[in-house]
Image (cartoon, rainbow, N blue to C red):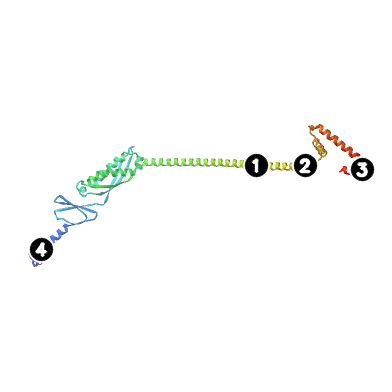
Amino acid sequence: MDDFFSVLGPIGVVGIILIIVILIYALRAIRIVRPYEKGVVERVGRFIRVWEPGLHLLIPFVDRVTKVDMRENVVDVPPQEVITKDNVAVTVDAVVYYEATDPFKLIYNVANFFLAATKLAQTNLRNVIGEMQLDESLTSREKINITLRDILDDATDKWGVRVVRVELQRIEPPGDVTQAMHRQMKAERDRRAMILEAEGDRAAAIARAEGTKQSAILEAEGKATAIKEIAGAERAQRILIAEGEAQAILNVFSAIHEGGPSQDLISVRYLDTLKYVANGNATKIFMPLEMQGLASTVGAIGELLKEADNKPAAAAPVAAV
């Protein structure tokens, strides 16, 4: 070593020392700011500027740079006991997501942001849930999240931070309250099941009654239609019979007039008809209205019989016919 320094001499040693100092100075003067960071530069304890991402130079041992992470970060709020409006103690914890907006404020306006944000979130969480009933707090997570985010965002604005969102991790009631809630839930479900079953039975009964009603209506309509058809058929039959009888009477009447019957033949047929009318066991007595005509008819028949007796025997077969 002595030989090395003796060879270089005092000037060489000084040169080496200068080179080492320059390297150290250069290494400490060069600073690189990452894309998700910003740098707050101080010179002799006084704020100078804010560095953007990239390569920067500073004066070693004079300037000091503090890098601020501009990405979204999270603050974990530890569990705590909170009393609801109806005096039920619940265990609540949450997480707060935030991002830095102003590095200067974040460095100089708050000493310990994580501790300040945690205490602020715990305090406001107690205030928000303390104004709610237990049931409301269990079913209003979104409302609690939005309320806490608005409160924390307003409070942390002077710290150069924007609260992105707040999420409740859990709201846990005591064990006995949880068991009571389970029993209440079961009773409510049983009640809904019974209501639905009753409504189903009611709907089924209504459907059956409606079906019976429609069946009776259709049956009555069918019977009425059948009766109308039968009555129409009977009416048509009677009309046909009456038309047939009328046609028969017309045929008989026409035949009688076309044959030109004599008064003697009509009288004989009249007496023959009276024989059939008087025959039988009836207690009523039939008396012809035209008694004088009947008497004259009988007399005419007697005259005919006398003439028949006075005729010769050769004419007898003709009279018999």
Q: Which mark is residue 247?
A: none
| Outermost right residue | 312
Q: Which residue is mark 3?
A: 313
Alpha-carbon span between mark 2 and mark 1: 37 Å
Mark 2: which amino acid? His
Q: Which residue is mark 4?
A: 15
Report x, y in % for residue 212: 56, 41
- Label 1 sits on a secondary structure element that is helix
Q: Which residue is mark 1?
A: 232
Mark 4: which amino acid? Gly
The mark closer to the camera, 3 or 2, is 2
The mark closer to the camera, 2 or 1, is 2
In this image, 214 relative to 172: left or right? right
Task: Please identify the quadrant where the N terminus is shown.
Answer: bottom left
Mark 3: which amino acid? Ala
Nearest the viewer among 199 and 129 is: 199
In this image, 287 relative to 171: left or right? right
Q: Is residue 142 visible?
A: yes
Q: Which residue is mark 2?
A: 257
Report x, y in % for residue 178: 37, 42
| Up/down of 52 relative to 185, above or below | below
Nearest the viewer among 77 and 232 is: 232
Mark 1: which amino acid? Gly
